[in-house]
Amino acid sequence: MPCRVCDSERLELALDLGQQPWCNHFLKPEEAGAEPRYPLRLVYCHDCATPQLDHTVAKEVMFGDHTYLSGVTRTLSDHFREVAREVDQRFGHLGRTILDIGSNDGTTLRHFQDLSWDVLGVESSRSVARRAVEQGIPTVNEFFALPMARALGRRFDVIHASGVFFHLEELHPVTEAIREVLRPDGVFVVEFLYMKTIVENLAFDQIYHEHLLYYNLANLRHLLRRHGLDLFDARFSPIHGGSIIGFAGHAGAHSPSERLQALQAAEDAAGANRFQTYLDFAGRVEKAREENLAFLRQRRAEGKTIFGMGAPVKGNTLLNYFGVGPDLIQVLVEKNPMRRGLLAPGSHIPVVMEGDVTSPPDVYYVLAWNFKKEILKNHQDLLEQGVEFYFPVNPKEDNA
């Protein structure tokens, strides 16, 4: 396959995580064992330095009716409130219309509504879009694409996309659609997991089939410039273990900030866009598998019970690559009611609701590690009782 960003054929394997099921396909008990598996391989483009998957699971499979909800976690809702306030203060004078691509349950747009913005969401999941509409968030239940963008018949002062740009099977048509519906002086706010930080944190579980591409500033700018857009500012955020909030516009419409230039310089100095960095990453991932399996097996040999804390999508990459099943982790404890009574794909570990756990385990193996502060704060009583919280990924909040 050609590079998803620059069309180069110079791609090389960097990390192979094996055959894995689509990680958001939480299973009904009768489906266990029948879930399809797909290659999960990260390849590197030697021309634009884009890490990407070399196999695509169709978007209709992954996003037609997924079970992820933005509003379940307070940390994430607080983050989107902060972003809304920042956008309002910095760019509200340009106009107050916003389009949110991949708007999920409307959590982000609800914060913009509170600031008196005119909002519109686009969300592909039928059930999730319905939740947003029921909460008063105008939402179009479609995949964002060039024809539907044109059919809106309007332009927006701000376009927001969080956790979307690495999902895009039709990457270039969607980027072109953003250019078309963004006002000449408008701002495209793009939030994405920062690959530099994924590598530094050894957060390989953030590599899964829904994430087709992985961005540093350099390769994102390469993509945007192909479509007459460019970043003019960016900042690091600790959300999801390390993300970038980028601010882009039509090329030449905004002057680049010193903050953006400093982030780019730090990225270059760290060698974040070099192929050898990814080969080293792959070696560290293999070592992490050995260490984590040794920990889990030792605790079970000691007769201790182990529950998973959270049933995040990324956790399934980790569980399947490590080869962990119910023999090591008995259940996954989750807040999202859409996953009640289901099994994690591949590992077949049962998902139970947090409120249904009557007795804590000896160990919580924290798959939702990106909400570490919130989890430890909410479970201070368990820590005092001696429950062990183990984080397979331990992010540093200052590694921008």
Image (cartoon, rainbow, N blue to C red):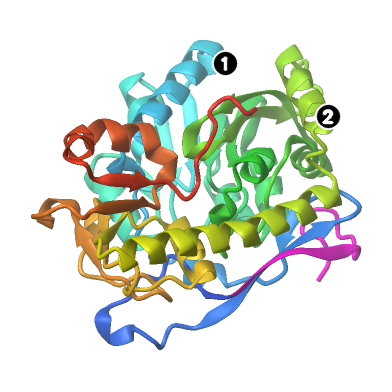
* Magenta span contains residue 11: yes
In the rendered image of this protein, does residue 315 appear above or below residue 328? above
SS for callout 1:
helix
Q: Magenta span covers which residues? A: 1-18
Which amino acid is tagged 1? Leu
Identify the residue under disc 2: 269
Amino acid residing under circle 2: Ala
Q: Residue at x 52, y 37 (%)?
A: 395
Q: Nearer the viewer, residue 348 or 326?
A: 326
- Residue at 29%, 54% in the rendered image: 130
- Closer to the camera: disc 2 or disc 1? 2
Q: Residue at x 71, y 52 (%)?
A: 281
Question: Mark 1 = which residue?
Answer: 94
Percent x, y for residue 260? 73, 21
Q: Is residue 278 left or right of residue 163?
A: right
Q: Position of residue 372 (x, y in %)?
A: 38, 37
Q: Could you say where residue 152 lies in the image, as x and y percent from the top left?
A: 52, 46
